[in-house]
Amino acid sequence: MTAPMVKPATKAVLYCRVSDKAQERKGNGLASQEACCREYARFRDYEVVEVFREVLTGSSQDRPAMTLLLKYLKQNKREGRVVIIDDISRFARDIRGHWLLREELRTAGGLLESPRIKFADDADSVFNENILASVAQHQRQKNAEQTKSRMRGRVQNGYWPFNPCIGLKHIRKSGEGMVLVRDEPVASVVQEALEGFASGRFQIQAEVKRFLLNHPDFPKRPEAGVTNQQVKVLLSRILYAGYVEAPEWDVPLRKGRHDGLISFETFERIQQRMKEGGYAPARADISDDFPLRGVLACDHCGKPLTGYWSGSSTGKKHPYYMCFNNTCARKRKSMRRDQVEGAFSDLLERLTPQPKLYELALAMFKDAWAQRSQQALAVAKRCEEEMGKVQKQIDVLLDRIVDAGSETIVGAYEKRITMLERSKIELVEKSKNVEPVKGTFEDLFELATRFLASPSKLWKFGDAAQRKMVLRLTFSDRLRYCPKNGFRTPKTTLPFSVLQGFSGGGEKMARPKRFELF
């Protein structure tokens, strides 16, 4: 009598995948797939020992959960495992990938099953499997095309269908869908950083980075804080100007349906400054110990002087400035800090204009401000005329495209049209921004005129940051210093150069420059 065959215990693993979180809300999420697979396992009398889940699009080649599944199968190859999937569309991204993954699964010791299809090696089963895999591939490609088409249409209509950049967020508006709005308080921080870089308050990107790092409302990354790349991207995002574009989808720059944090003119100024590169007018590590470090230069060689503490035989430390240039005649010859900074204070005092001269300059500035306000309307009218000319050029190029027979010529016309459209946007923004600014001259320039009247007071009583501002706003180049002769005639910024010209002291107006950060 033959002994009855004992059916070995069969163990199964489940693989569940969704493309995004939206499928969870539609009821086709990971939990739904797992429930169907578990019900099939109970029907087949399988013991579910592992479940592998992931949320990513089927077109992705890097699938961590599938990699772990294959590794698990190889580790338990001797026993073998049944791999249950809810649907063939959850398995691979295309027909070729389907059969490659099927073979990899079989080699690892897995047996693929599904409650919706029978996997077998006979001709009819393989034919059916090919059809279903082809249908799944077609649906995936069609969905991708439709999604891309919808997103492209959104960009064409001025909406941003992608993830918002920092300082902006999406809200749902009736009849419009998802629309970008300011995300406070981060939006105000980003706006200050952008406008600060455009105006020259932050001369280099490193200063923008320090500002963001030190601001409590700006979100930092757990380890990196604020990266250089993050600052570069932030300064390059056209979204902040209230515009959208998608060059990879042939959607040129256009006005967005959201309000920007800055004007388009400010954005263009930022791009220009990024191309030119910046110069910092004072060291980043300016401190109360050596506030002139990075600003002073040796009168003999022109190299920057370094501040340091020197210990005496009694153990007491004394502050000095020194030139460390090995080829300089004054190499390692100390200059007392008190002497150097005392001479600098005298220099600032000499730059302070006399009250009558200051009042005269202030009156001239007021007159210039009034004239600029009167000219604003004329500038706006000229902008409108220029916009009309640009539009005529665009119309001519569009007519030429229709008659062009070469793709190369068409491409050149399209490139030119894109440039003209950008010029038109600049003119539109400029016409808006040249309107007379509301407010009196005193209200708008109170702090600037107070500084111009007496920079020495701000240097004497201000903190390290305010002293740095004095250096930046007063001098346009390094200050060359000699212990015997003191400071050379400094190169000052434009306002002080103008005042020196008024004083009749023989000073020439220095061309504004910046001195680098060392």
Image (tube, rainbow, N blue to C red):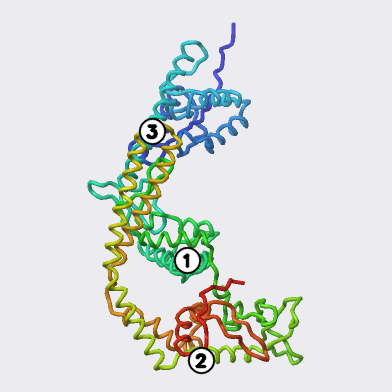
Task: Residue type at mark 2: give it.
Answer: Glu
- Secondary element type, mark 1: helix
Real-space Cα separation, disc 3 to disc 1, in angstroms = 39 Å
Judge the density around disc 2: few (<14), some (14-19), many (≥20) Cα neighbours within 10 Å: some
Picture disc at residue 349 = 2
x then y, percent, for residue 49? 52, 33
Q: Residue at x 54, y 74 (%)?
A: 281
Task: Residue type at mark 1: give it.
Answer: Leu
Q: Which residue is mark 3?
A: 145
- Secondary element type, mark 2: helix
Q: Is residue 477 left or right of residue 196?
A: right
> Which is more toward the observer, 52 or 360?
360
Answer with the quarter of the image where residue 300 lies.
bottom right
Q: Residue at x 46, y 18 (%)?
A: 130
**Quarter occupied by the C terminus:** bottom right
> Which is more toward the observer, 32 or 236?
236
Picture disc at residue 353 = none
> Which numbered disc, 3 or 1, marks the residue that appears first in the sequence?
3
Q: Residue at x 36, y 40 (%)?
A: 152
Q: Residue at x 45, y 56 (%)?
A: 236
- The reply to whether the C-beta atoms of the residues labelled 1 and 2 are less than 8 Å apart is no
> Which is more toward the observer, 171 or 373?
373
Q: Is residue 436 left or right of residue 23?
A: left
Judge the density around disc 1: few (<14), some (14-19), many (≥20) Cα neighbours within 10 Å: many
x then y, percent, for residue 170? 33, 52
**Quarter occupied by the N terminus:** top right
Q: Which residue is mark 1?
A: 212
> Which numbered disc, 1 or 2, marks the residue that appears first in the sequence?
1
Q: Is residue 314 left or right of residue 361?
A: right
Real-space Cα separation, disc 3 to disc 2, in angstroms = 70 Å
Number of numbered callouts drawn:
3
